[in-house]
Amino acid sequence: MTVRVLVVDDHTMVRLGLVGLIATTDDLEVVGEAANGVEAVAKAAELEPDVVLMDLQMPEMDGVRATREIVSAGRSQVLVLTSFSDTERIVDVLDAGAVGYLLKDTDPEELLEAVRSVSRGDSPLHPRVARQLLTSRTRGRSAGGDLTARELEVLELVRQGLANKQIARRLGISERTVKAHLTSVFSSIGVMDRTGAALWAQRHRDQQEL
């Protein structure tokens, strides 16, 4: 089955290069282009592509906001392709619902395979991005294994009995991101499932109230 792709980038030469690259394949097809976030949201709603290849730094509406609107409104998956690898941008756009994050120095064949993998439900990350996330997590925690602020939010909602889909809606992030946070939480506090996490959260909450 052909994977339908929307290419979003404010640089014409970059868009042309991506369109030309995708045209060399038999299983990927460019169904539209957008030069900014506003156009991206509109064309994603109109065309319903399988994958949106999303730049981040754009006029009128940036890629983070565009990603959030596309993910919340339709069935398209967003794969980020950008020059930026700072932790804040990475976390923001993944929280907005992007399922993958690549840098523009990615090998062309790896980029094409990443688009395919996104359509299959996978979450490709550029090695430098993955390393940045791991480094950030290490710095953000004390030796005692403290949770990040976002993980604490997710854990509190688990304690309240909310399902992953409800947590995602409450926090404005994707269900996939909620699952990723929970996996990290389970590992950090030494439990196997959400029931154990809820009990852990309740116990520590009670201790704080004493």
Image (cartoon, grey):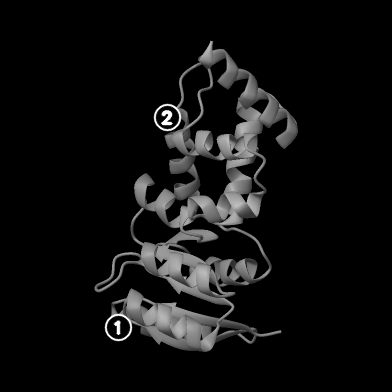
Query: In the image, residue 178 lies at what x, y percent?
Result: 59, 48
Q: Amino acid at mark 1?
A: Thr
Kindly identify the residue that appears in the image at 67 percent across and 40 percent down: 161
Disc count in the image?
2
Residue 159's disc number: none
> In terms of image quadrants, where is residue 3?
bottom right
Specify the farthest residue to the left: 59
Q: Nearer the viewer, mark 1 or mark 2?
A: 2
In this view, which residue lies farthest toward the top?
Answer: 210
Asked if one can make out residue 30 in the rendered structure from this viewpoint, the answer is: no
Find residue 46 and report its horizontal and vertical position in percent.
49, 88
* C-alpha span from label 1 to label 2: 38 Å
210 and 146: which one is in front?
210
Q: Which image quarter holds the C terminus?
A: top right
Tell me what residue is drawn at x 34 percent, y 78 percent: 38
- Identify residue for label 2: 140
Q: Is residue 75 above or below residue 92?
A: below
Q: Secondary structure at mark 1?
A: helix
Location of residue 15 in the rendering, given as x and y in whole percent from the top left corner = 37, 81
**Amino acid identity at mark 2:** Gly
| Secondary structure found at label 2 | loop
Characterize the local packing of mark 1: few (<14), some (14-19) or many (20 or more) Cα atoms within 10 angstroms: few
Q: Closer to the camera, 123 or 96?
A: 96
For disc 1, the marked residue is 12
The answer to which of marks 1 and 2 sits earlier in the sequence is 1
Residue 186 picture quarter: top right
Residue 108, position in %: x, y?
49, 71
- Give the residue at x 67% y 31%: 198
Q: Residue at x 60, y 33 (%)?
A: 185
Question: In the figure, is residue 19 to the left or right of 200?
Answer: left
**Residues at circles 1 and 2 in contact by the CB criterion of under 8 Å:** no
